[in-house]
Image (cartoon, rainbow, N blue to C red):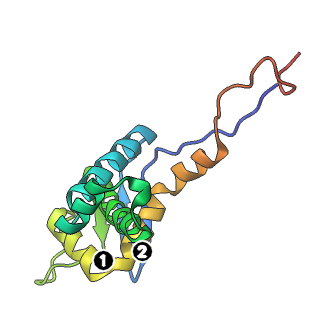
Amino acid sequence: MVLRLARRLAVSRTIDLGYGVSVSHRPFDYADLCEAKATAHRLAREALPAARAFDAALHDDEDLGPEHEEALRGQAARHLVKLLLLRFGDRWEGIVAEDGSPAPLNAETLDAFLDLFPGVASTLHLSLESPWVELEMEGNVSAPSPHTATAEA
């Protein structure tokens, strides 16, 4: 007999960011995350400064310095947070506009928020991705092969 834990990874969640700020999002599945990651990497490459983009086009990826990859990874993470929250975000609490009214969760306010509080982007990135990262770390979750010692006789 093979037993597995039942998982509900694609569920609505609220992420507490501290200081009375929280972000809620609708469920998204692994395919949504992978598509958003691919789009985020494409956007990060397109947003490279001209000199870095020329160096990237001139050399193989493995010949570029670690600072290039680190800058690209940071931009992709920020784009991923924005994409997921703009596509699946329901609301946020604790963020107000200049006039004191609740700020809408849209591209402009999200950009301003991430610019003002850059550490929040990494917290959001980890929180949005963590359930799926744990699943990836477990490896292939398909049924055991009939040719292995774990299969029923």
Q: Say which amino acid is labelled 2.
A: Leu
Mark 2 residue crowding within 10 angstroms, few (<14) / some (14–19) / many (20+): some
Q: Which mark is residue 19?
A: none
Q: Position of residue 30 (x, y in %)?
A: 45, 41
Query: For this view, does 152 lie left or right of residue 35?
Result: right
Instruction: Tell me which residue sits at (65%, 28%) in the image.
Output: 142
For mark 2, what is the residue?
17
Instruction: Tell me which residue sits at (34%, 42%) in the image.
Output: 35
Compared to 137, does 75 lie above or below? below
Compared to 149, does 5 lie above or below? below
Mark 1 residue crowding within 10 angstroms, few (<14) / some (14–19) / many (20+): few
Quarter of the image where the C terminus is located = top right
Q: Position of residue 152 (x, y in %)?
A: 85, 19
Q: Earlier in the sequence, mark 1 or mark 2?
A: 2
Residue 112 lies in quadrant:
bottom left
- For the residues labelled 1 and 2, say whether their Cβ atoms are less than 8 Å apart: yes
Q: Which mark is residue 94?
A: 1
Residue 77 lies in quadrant:
bottom left
Instruction: Tell me which residue sits at (27%, 62%) in the image.
Output: 55
C-alpha span from label 1 to label 2: 10 Å
Quarter of the image where the N terminus is located = top right
Q: Say which amino acid is labelled 1.
A: Gly
Q: Which type of secondary structure does the marked residue at label 1 adopt?
A: loop
Q: Position of residue 81 (x, y in %)?
A: 34, 60
